[in-house]
Image (cartoon, rainbow, N blue to C red):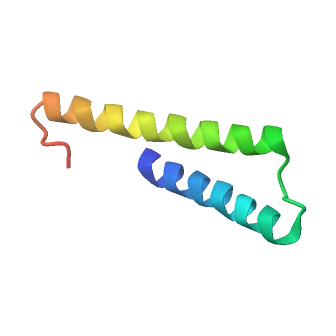
Amino acid sequence: MALGLSLILFIIFTVNVAYGAATGAPVLGDVGEMLVLFAAAAAFVVAILKKEADRENGEGGK
């Protein structure tokens, strides 16, 4: 779940940057881009920590 959320947020960030480069007017401003990228990174860290905890508990991390 967290890994999927991270992917979705990163895609939103990438689309916003590409749209801004193509049109000169991104949908999100600098602060919005920062918040989306921060949320994507945080969700990724949560997913990795969950996988690591599962592996330590003998659940295999799958």
The image quarter containing residue 36 is top right
Q: Residue at x 9, y 34 (%)?
A: 58
Instruction: Name the one closer to the observer, 28 or 53.
Output: 28
Q: Residue at x 53, y 38 (%)?
A: 41
**Looking at the image, which residue sits at the far right?**
25
Q: How many marks?
A: 0
Residue 1 to residue 38: above or below: below
**Residue 8 location, x and y as percent?**
56, 57
The image quarter containing residue 31 is top right
**Looking at the image, which residue sits at the far left?**
58
The image quarter containing residue 22 is bottom right
Residue 17 to residue 46: above or below: below
Q: Residue at x 62, y 36 (%)?
A: 38
Q: Residue at x 19, y 43 (%)?
A: 61
**Looking at the image, which residue sits at the far bottom?**
22
**Residue 13 location, x and y as percent?**
66, 54
29 horizontally vs 38: left or right: right
**Residue 5 location, x and y as percent?**
52, 51
